[in-house]
Image: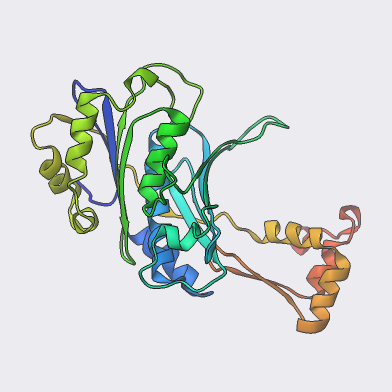
Amino acid sequence: MDPRGLHRFLFEGLPVRGAFVRLTSGWQEALRRRATVGAFAEPVRILLGEMAAAGVLMHSSIKFDGALILQIHGDGPLKLAVAEVKSDLSFRATAKVVGEVSINDRLGALANVGGMGRCAITLDARTRATGVQPYQGVVPLHGDQRESLDDFSAVIEHYMLQSEQLDTRMLLAANDEVAAGLLLQRMPSTGLGNLAAGRDEDLIGAHEDFNRLSLLASTLSRTELLTLDVDTLLHRLFWEEKLQRFEVLPTRFSCSCARSRVQQMLQGLGRVELEEILAEQNQVEIGCEFCGQQYRFDAVDVEEMFIPALLQLPPTSTLQ
């Protein structure tokens, strides 16, 4: 089977589902585009890759038409990290870094120096009624004993246990070539109203089959996660289990930025501020933090932003 993309599977006869994802060309494109406006330090790139892989895995386990957004709000050199995954498994990721990052920094040193780091998980439906807010859950970047969580996978496991009451095992790894992840999840027996599509609190931490499979998964090394093809990986971990495999789903990098959206944002700044920028720089230039796309607006563009729609001329192609 194609090693790229998302692979979903079930353990036959057991209430446990799994998924494996390997982001390759899409992840490399995301880093290449970001490098055009300034590459992130390696620990930040690794974290963003893990967040992108985690987002794809999580989106694959729910029936939801919209974007799943993972955000880390940090109190260290990493102020913000974001990964967004849409229903078609297209993804993008970016970060805001405000301090020096050391080569060996992990999540705690990046975003939880003072113990105030948070992870927010948002489900933003593609269509929702006016006034209805997106579903969002927030957890700290520490465990029940206030211990700092240095692996993003541990944050997701903690979130799923605390917020969704669902046993989850997730392994993540990333470098500049690959972002990969493995997810095991005990399937809920009831409920449809939450992220995990069900709660079964009596079985939390006590399901023998899930615990056994989770223990097997934990033997997987970071190198194996990044390099093994999916068939070898699943056989090495679960060779005694019967797996039901599903169609491989493609993943890709995609950014939803657009000149029209940037223009709306600039209009919100107001004419006076834009004219001040024009006086200093002769143009207004905005770069997308996700893909590096540069949008430039000259004095004519800015003038047109503030002309009432009724007074604007139609495109020249429509003129007779």
| Vertical position of residue 310 compared to residue 33: above or below | above
The reply to whether residue 58 is in sight is no
Which of the two residues, 96 or 150, is positioned nearer the viewer here? Answer: 150
The residue shown at (91%, 57%) is: 311
Q: Quadrant of residue 169?
A: top left
The residue shown at (62%, 34%) is: 127
| Vertical position of residue 35 compared to residue 144: above or below | below
Q: Quadrant of residue 32?
A: bottom left
Q: Is residue 258 left or right of residue 190?
A: right
Q: Quadrant of the C terminus?
A: bottom right
Q: Is residue 196 left or right of residue 11?
A: right
Residue 235 coordinates in the image, percent (x, y):
11, 42
Which of the two residues, 274 or 88, is positioned nearer the viewer here? Answer: 274
Residue 165 coordinates in the image, percent (x, y):
41, 27
Which of the two residues, 294 or 55, is positioned nearer the viewer here? Answer: 55
Residue 190 coordinates in the image, percent (x, y):
40, 16
The residue shown at (38%, 29%) is: 166
Q: Is residue 120 left or right of residue 24?
A: right
Residue 212 coordinates in the image, percent (x, y):
18, 32
